[in-house]
Image (cartoon, rainbow, N blue to C red):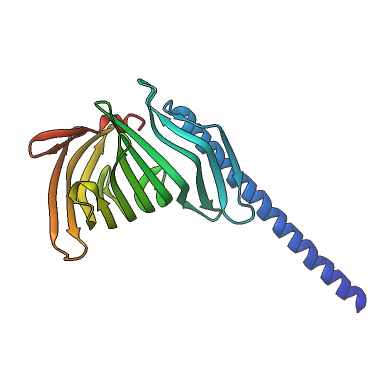
């Protein structure tokens, strides 16, 4: 009787060991595939540079850290985007979603020697992926600070961004800023909402966007601004105000 109990106990221990070993091997294989695919995609894009890529997270989330990440304009060597660390993670049993997290992402846009500096603090995004095609993006940014040539322009708090692909290359955009302080309207606190639809075809954007700015105290509209985007050119009241090719070159 005692021998039978000992054998049953040993069998249970062996089964547990085999199960843990199998999961560990599975985790390592999926982690390796995820990291290698990421390395391949980064290597194919000459505008992206980084210092190191390392994996962590065992035994739960598969986490890949891209350290000293930069997107560089290969024609001018200007840095468009940089982050000390970008963390990408997936669940080992759900490969359809990728989470992106970073404490700070800085974007630098040079327009006619006027430098826009956009600092995004505490960024968390979830991207739904199917055969490497983007279907939807849900992103939350705790705070965004915008300056131009070191002059304060805006401070945005609690920013939520949703991009949904309804049909191939056709995207609905819905962005909400819960609270913002804009230097251009006497620093009053406002909310900002941007909605629209864009079509992306061979790195070229076309579509329409509408920006609604409301006073938080009175809930009255401050500005209601319609924008057209034609062949990567942002147009407002028949005036070309920005060339999106400056930030879409890396796609």
| Name of the residue lying farthest toward the bottom | 1
Judge from the rendering whether residue 38 lies leftward or rightward of residue 185; answer left or right.
Answer: right
Closer to the camera, 94 or 114? 114
Quadrant in which the C terminus appears: top left
Q: Position of residue 194 (x, y in %)?
A: 22, 52
| Name of the residue lying farthest toward the left | 238
Q: Position of residue 105 (x, y in %)?
A: 42, 42
x 17%, y 42%: residue: 207
Within the image, what quadrant is residue 110 found in?
top left
Judge from the rendering whether residue 81 lies leftward or rightward of residue 110; answer left or right.
Answer: right
Judge from the rendering whether residue 12 lies leftward or rightward of residue 231; answer left or right.
Answer: right
x 50%, y 38%: residue: 38
Is residue 128 at all visible to an observer of this figure?
Answer: yes
Closer to the camera, 164 or 4? 164
Compared to 169, does 143 lie above or below? below
Is residue 177 at all visible to an observer of this figure?
Answer: no
Judge from the rendering whether residue 131 lies leftward or rightward of residue 249; answer left or right.
Answer: right
Q: Position of residue 73 (x, y in %)?
A: 37, 26
């Amino acid at each position: 009787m005692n021998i039978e109990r000992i054998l049953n106990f040993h069998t249970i221990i062996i089964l547990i060991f085999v199960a843990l070993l199998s999961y560990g091997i599975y985790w390592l294989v999926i982690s390796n595939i995820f990291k290698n695919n990421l390395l391949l995609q980064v290597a194919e894009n000459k505008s992206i540079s980084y210092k190191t890529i390392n994996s962590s997270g065992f035994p739960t989330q598969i986490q890949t850290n891209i350290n000293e990440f930069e997107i560089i304009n290969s024609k001018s060597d200007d840095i468009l985007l940089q982050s000390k660390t970008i963390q990408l993670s997936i669940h080992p049993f759900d490969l359809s979603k990728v989470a992106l997290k970073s404490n700070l992402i800085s974007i630098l846009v040079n327009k006619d020697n006027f430098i826009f500096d956009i600092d995004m603090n505490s960024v968390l995004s979830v991207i739904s992926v199917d055969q490497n095609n983007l279907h939807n993006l849900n992103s939350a940014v705790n705070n965004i600070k915008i300056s131009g040539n070191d002059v304060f322009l805006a401070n945005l708090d609690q920013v939520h961004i949703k991009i949904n692909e309804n049909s191939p290359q056709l995207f609905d955009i819905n962005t909400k800023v819960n609270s913002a302080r804009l230097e251009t309207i006497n620093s009053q606190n406002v909310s900002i909402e941007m909605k629209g639809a864009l079509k992306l075809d061979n790195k070229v954007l076309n579509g329409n966007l509408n920006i609604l700015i409301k006073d938080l105290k009175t809930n009255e509209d401050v500005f209601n601004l319609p924008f057209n985007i034609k062949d990567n050119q942002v147009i407002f009241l028949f005036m070309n105000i920005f060339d999106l090719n400056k930030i879409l070159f890396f796609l």
